[in-house]
Image: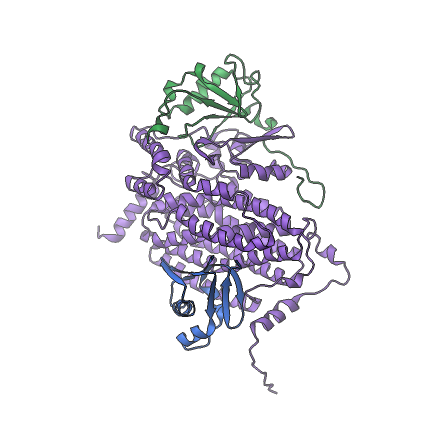
Chain colours: A blue, B purple, C green
Amino acid sequence: MSTVFIALQTNEDTRPIIEAIEIDNPLAVVHREPAMVKIDAPDRLVVRRSTIEELIGRDFDLQEMHINLITLSGNVAEDDDTLTLSWNN
Amino acid sequence: MDMKVSKKKLGLKERYRLMTRDLGWDTTYQPKDKVLPYVGYEGIKIHDWDKWEDPFRLTMDSYWKYQAEKERKFYAIIDAHAQNNGHLNLTDARYLSALKIFLQAISPGEYAAHKGFARVGREFPGVGTQVACQMQAIDEIRHAQTQIHAMSNYNRYYNGFHAFADQRDRIWYTSVARSFFDDAMSAGPFEFMIAIGFSFEYVLTNLLFVPFMSGAAYNGDMATVTFGFSAQSDEARHMTLGLECIKFMLEQDPANVPIVQGWIDKWFWRGFRVLGLVSTMMDYMLPKRVMSWREAWNIYGVENGGALFKDLARYGITPPKGWDDAEKGIDHMSHQFMLGLYQWSFGTAFHSWIPSDEDMAWLSAKYPDTFDKHYRPRWNHIRKLAAAGTPFKNYGLAKLCQTCQLPTVFTEPDDPTLTCHRETTYKGEKYHFCSDGCQHIFDNEPEKYIQAWLPMPQLFQDPIKGDLGEWMKWVSLIDGKDNGDYAGSEDQQHFEAWRGLATTNQ
Amino acid sequence: MPVAATREYVGVPRDVAANFHGKQLVYVSWDRHLLFAAPFLLCVPPEMKFRELLDGPLAMLSQPDPDAAAIDWTQVEWLKSNQPWTPDFGRSLADNGIGHKDQLRFRTQGANTLLTAA
């Protein structure tokens, strides 16, 4: 098992994104640090557009995350509906 | 007449194809290898450039939109910081030493990275790679500018911020970061990508930015949190570019694997040495500490680096050669650096200090196997010397490593009581190193590293000829203001006086 | 290994003896006395007697170490380029074979206060 992670700035834009990640990744562990939220997950983490849209009640473009992204780890795969981080081991 | 245009939104993949791939073109009146002459000489074989893909599929139109948004957020906070005397919200002005080192050594590195990516964006043939490198080149110059702008707010009130450009060129400790980027920029485009895109951005950058920004947040420095996160929001893209690039090189031809492995070995060690100073910042310079260097290394080095190299094992890539020696140094390096910075503080454009009892209790708890045994006795003695009115200054200056240019402060990997001495003779000249890692790098390309401009030997050559006062003028260091112990400094006096004014009615 | 380059690549060293106006660099360190963060860099004339090096710059620089006053230079073990070596105190650095950028190390047998303090 290897850990993938994503870290986002702590602000109003990221609150629903973090909430969506928690919904979609039951194994994820959320660390709230000063000004930053870091989410670890074993091997794989998925960010799902539809979950975020349900929470915010409007259309969401996953690329909006770039504004508040701090760092990530793992191989990145992105399409219109999901952003996935994973290790192949 | 009006034409109704269908507003059907393009999908991510289609937009990337149209806005990136379709920007490519073939040469007509010159052969391609004349237009792109630097892509072959390093020995990397690429058969199909179209196989390279940006996993974020960020197109230039979206790039500008998001970057503009980041700038708006950044300046809103910088303005508020300046308007509200944000500098008085710091935990303590000791914190500023970390910022001064950042401004003198790291921000110029951002500018160097800008030049490097602008160049490789021109030298690579693949259009996906070209666009990603151009974006990164623009990011890096934005980082240099926003950092300098944010930190200029402190220049109005505190010493040591006024001459970072001279100090970038001339003072001794900045040559560590400068030579790192010069080394990368004078390599070919593929090596540059492994050096900066992969080793620095992917393997090591988290150790710089994440603790640094959290440290800024802990210590009340809103300006730095802002430039840090604004810059860091680009780093995820840079890291991904670095990782995609290395996978692309490894997948294109098996003959690339040993070349790439050699670069990983080299650039991991180069980066580890440059970022070593971060250890001192985390363990000593933040008045309110976030986590120890050891704890940060466990998260971002051992755990994350371990996952990465396990992932790359399928290509035949092994962890960098210096990995084990790095691990052996983790519990020692911050103490070894800080002892050096303190005893040479007459020559630094930032302050250092003797750790307090409380600081030492924290260090002892975080480094149970090393601090009390090796480093506390030295600090206690240094404290005694200061109390006796003979503060410790080491005018012997220091032997520097020919490769990383740091003073050779490190001990043998398996014997923390003995300084690591390594030397070699090349074409009749002697050269010294701080470690096996740095000596290996030299031995692989001696013609490159014999050209190193080592600031301490340089002090005894023209134009300074060993005159310390002349040297201070030459590096724009104001003796008694910018340098020396924090205790009794103008920075300390001013901060305490102004904070008093801000929090009382006196 | 040669540097990968598009044409012949030749470097020019920056710290050759000729740049030091008749002086030379010598690095000196006291083994296992780590109050001093790195080996000292000294810039001295090659005609300097070895004893002058000890009594002058080296004695002054070593002074902050609590064991410095107890050094008996006649009992000190020396290494040059990491090999055992015996200096002649009355002769010059040049006559002792100490070249530009040579590293000298010395070891003392007596107490090491800061090493055993813990």
Q: Is residue B138 above or below residue B486?
A: below
Left of B51 or right of it: where is B373?
Answer: left
* Quarter of the image with the N terminus of chain B in it: bottom right
In the rendered image, residue A67, in percent from the top left (x then y), is placed at: 46, 64
Does residue B181 show up? no
Residue sitting at 39 percent across and 50 percent down?
B154
Residue B397: % across, % down: 46, 31
Q: Check the image and name the residue furthest to the right.
A: B29
**Which residue is found at the position 51% from the left and 48% from the top?**
B108
Residue B484 sits above or below residue A3 on the image: above
Residue at the top extreme of this rendering: C90
Q: In the drawing, does residue B301 fall left or right of residue C16?
A: left
The image shows residue B362 at horizontal and vertical percentages of 32, 43
**x 49%, y 51%: residue:** B306
Note whether residue B243 is visible. Answer: yes
Vertical side of B206 occupied by B73: above or below: below
Q: Nearer the viewer, residue B16 or B220?
A: B16
Residue at the outermost left position? B505
Total numbered circles: 0
Image x and y of residue B282, in percent: 39, 46
